[in-house]
Image (spheres, rainbow, N blue to C red):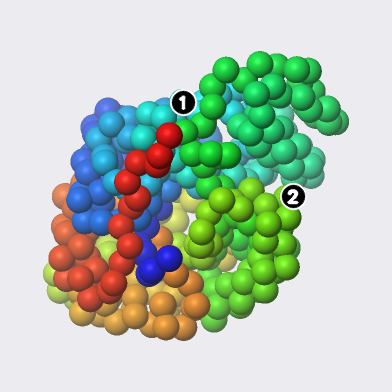
């Protein structure tokens, strides 16, 4: 795979109406598609202003009708919240509705509070996640679903729907630790992480080494995918001038911080991750790419040179940014940053 750019989106609450928010995101998706972004990845969150798309499949079904090339997928489906039988059939529907452009990000969920609202004990979530993943994959790959575990049981269920991409759409996994990198590599999943360039480089190195050992094993969910994708997520704001950073981007980032930490603060505890309300601090920690087009172009170059990754996933609509502000930032990136990099665009429809 060549170098590629993707988009990550929480779909945070904004000041406008909910239908206005969704329509604005779909218009942004049309622009991502036209600009040649490889993939669009939407988060799943519950009971928080951080996520207004708690059913990512519903939003992606709409996105599939407004785009043509960009690949679409959740990052991630929170598997402990799903019945694997139902999820497998919905994945099949989405894969066909998108003309074979669906990717499947999976995870257990990082927020113990969101899981608790669904009565899922956080300490049990990983075991439930692994069972749900195994059962979902069987449902996608076999004409009848048989599975017996501690948390799920399916007896000879006819699977009338098949995915367009065979044997299944590509799987993705979010990585934050050596253990999660190992899980992604053992299962052949594309990986997307967080952290500064040096940390991403370490995860990519570990992933490549472990993927080589496990490639083609029975656990490999992406054995049919030619080349693994290794990426990292960054907030992005491409400013017209330096004044915009403090006047527009910095207060918008504070809103993002308030949204992502809300449930931890509601329960009078600290977030599990080192979030900051200060955009300048986030930029120095390489969690955000912020500046003029020239400055952001240099930051992107340093990422690809130093990380060993082949995929940079950017968030253009976040926190308190208005629709117009996100659009202008995206337009500057697409016209003044992307042309300096040889990028791979989203894939056309897969063969039946």
Q: Residue at x 45, y 62 (%)?
A: 233
210 and 314: which is toward the camera: 210
Marked residue nearer the N-terminal end (1 or 2): 1
Q: Residue at x 20, y 51 (%)?
A: 34
Q: Where, by quadrant of the figure, is residue 338 drawn?
A: bottom left
Looking at the image, residue 193 sits to the left or right of residue 278; the answer is right
The disc placed on residue 93 is: 1
User: Is residue 209 shown above or below 220?
Assistant: below
Q: Residue at x 77, y 24 (%)?
A: 146
256 and 24: which is toward the camera: 24
The disc placed on residue 61 is: none
Q: How many marks?
A: 2
46 and 221: which is toward the camera: 221
Q: Where, by quadrant of the figure, is residue 25 drawn?
A: top left
Q: Position of residue 113 (x, y in %)?
A: 64, 40
User: Marks 1/2: CA distance?
Assistant: 26 Å
Q: Given this view, does label 1 or label 2 mark the residue nearer the observer?
A: 2
Looking at the image, residue 128 sits to the left or right of residue 24; the answer is right
Residue 177 seen by the camera: no
Report the residue that reaches farthest toward the front. Answer: 352
Q: Which residue is mark 2?
A: 218
Q: Position of residue 344 (x, y in %)?
A: 33, 62
Looking at the rendered structure, the secondary structure element under dot 1 is helix
Looking at the rendered structure, the secondary structure element under dot 2 is loop
């Amino acid at each position: 795979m060549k170098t590629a750019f993707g988009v990550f989106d929480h779909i945070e609450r904004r000041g406008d109406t909910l239908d206005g928010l969704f329509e604005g995101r779909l218009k942004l998706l049309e622009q991502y598609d036209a600009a040649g972004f490889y993939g669009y990845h939407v988060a799943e969150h519950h009971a928080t202003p951080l996520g207004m798309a708690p059913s990512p499949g519903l939003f992606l079904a709409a996105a599939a009708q407004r785009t043509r090339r960009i690949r679409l997928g959740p990052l991630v489906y929170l598997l402990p919240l799903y019945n694997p039988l139902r999820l497998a059939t919905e994945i099949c529907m989405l894969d066909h509705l998108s003309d074979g452009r669906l990717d499947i990000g999976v995870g257990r969920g990082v927020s113990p509070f969101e899981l608790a609202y669904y009565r899922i004990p956080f300490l049990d979530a990983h075991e439930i996640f692994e069972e749900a993943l195994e059962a979902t994959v069987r449902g996608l790959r076999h004409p009848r679903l048989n599975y017996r575990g501690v948390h799920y049981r399916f007896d000879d269920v006819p699977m009338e729907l098949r995915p367009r991409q065979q044997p299944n759409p590509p799987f993705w996994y979010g990585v934050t630790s050596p253990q999660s990198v190992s899980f992604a590599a053992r299962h052949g999943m594309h990986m997307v992480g967080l952290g500064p360039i040096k940390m991403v480089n370490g995860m990519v190195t570990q992933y490549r080494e472990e993927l080589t050992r496990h490639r083609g094993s029975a656990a490999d969910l992406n054995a049919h995918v030619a080349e693994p994708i290794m990426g990292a997520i960054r907030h992005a704001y491409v400013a017209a001038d330096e004044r915009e950073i403090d006047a527009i981007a910095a207060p918008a980032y504070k809103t993002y911080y308030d949204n992502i930490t809300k449930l931890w603060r509601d329960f009078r505890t600290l977030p599990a991750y080192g979030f900051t309300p200060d955009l300048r601090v986030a930029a120095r920690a390489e969690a955000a790419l912020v500046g003029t087009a020239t400055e952001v172009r240099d930051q992107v170059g340093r990422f690809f040179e130093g990380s060993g990754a082949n995929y940079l996933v950017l968030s253009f609509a976040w926190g308190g940014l208005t629709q117009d502000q996100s659009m202008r930032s995206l337009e500057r990136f697409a016209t003044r940053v992307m042309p300096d990099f040889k990028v791979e665009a989203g894939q056309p429809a897969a063969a039946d």
